Structures are given as C-alpha cells and as structure tokens.
Amino acid sequence: MVGVLKAVLIAIVSVIVLILIMQLAFFFPFYMTVVIETAKLANIAATDNYLKVSYLADSEMLLRERPIFNNTEFEITVTNADGRNAVGFDNSLIYEEDEYLADNFKPYLQRGEPITVTMTAEYPIEVILWGRPLPLRPVEVSYSVTTIGLRYYKDLDT
C-alpha cells in the first residue's frame, strides 16, 4: 500500500514539474515581448525627449491584442532625469509656443538628458490539476531601458 501511494505521489509531483516546465517555455516569449516593446518605446522616446500619448496608447493596444497579454496586468512608465512623467501631447508645438509655460510643466528635457522607459507585467502561472486551478501567484517581471534624448529644444533654458 505504501508503494502504491509513493507511486501516485511521484506521478503527481512529476506532472506538476512538467507543467511548470511548460509554463517556463511560455514565459520566454512573454518576457521577450516585454523587452522588445520596452526597447521600441525607448527608441521612440529618444527622438523627441518624451513619449507621445498616441505611441503609448498604440503600444498598449497592440499588447492587449496579443493572446498572452489579454488577461495580464501591465504598466508602462516613462520618466525624465528629474523623475517627472515624460509622456506628453502629440504636438510638441503646444509646449514650445506657450511662452508662459514653465519648464517644469513640459514633459521633455534638453538634449543629452536621460529618459527611462520601464514596463512591468505579471505573468500568470496557470496549473490545472483534476479540473481545478491551483492557486499560484503570478510572477512579476520588469524591464527598464535608459536612453538619451536627441532633440534640442530652443524653448528650454540650457
């Protein structure tokens, strides 16, 4: 009787290990998507020294269309060197033409200042055993890219 119970226990543990290995195989494309999207947004943010709202919305929409990100919580943050949010309007002339707008209300800094793009997402681990899902915590992954702004703005003090 003890031998049968050991065999059943070993079978259950080996099935759980195989399921976790399969989850790891699906985790790699999930993480690579996080890395590629973060690098793409950092490249776009470097051209204008801030990220435009339309690019951020397009990226979030494209991620929501992917099956693995359908029911996943993720957050994209873009910050300047001084810690301010670096997401702004699509038309930068709004900031440049308003001579009364202080520099700290503009989402961009001068050329050469760092911009950090961070994407944080939760990878859901789903293990179903005997028709019931096991309660496992999702794995939170984060990837961050720091880039340098390339555009020179005449309206900013140097």
Image (spheres, grey):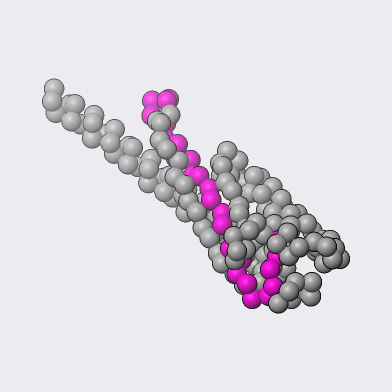
Residue at position x 53%, y 48% in the image: 121
- Residue 57 point in image, percent of width and height: 71, 50
Q: Position of residue 143 (x, y in %)?
A: 51, 58
Horizontal side of 143 relative to 67 (left or right) equals left
Of residue 10 and residue 101, the one placed in the foreground of this image is 101
Image location (x, y in percent) of residue 65: 66, 45
Examine the image and state in which quarter residue 99 appears.
bottom right
> Which is nearer the eye, 32 or 141?
141
Q: Position of residue 3 (x, y in %)?
A: 14, 28
- The correct choice, above or below, for 45 with respect to 1 in the image is below
**Residue 88, above or below 122:** below
Determine if the magenta segment contains residue 29: no
Query: What is the span of residues highlighted in magenta in the rendered image?
Result: 107-132
Question: Height in image: 134 above or below 68?
Answer: above
Q: Residue at point 44% right, 50% down?
A: 25
x 79%, y 71%: residue: 155
Q: Is residue 122 visible?
A: yes
Query: What is the count of numbered marks?
Result: 0
Judge from the rendering whether residue 74 lies leftward or rightward of residue 157; answer left or right.
left
90 relative to 65 in the view: left or right = right
- The front one of 2 and 109 is 109
Residue reaching furthest to the top: 1
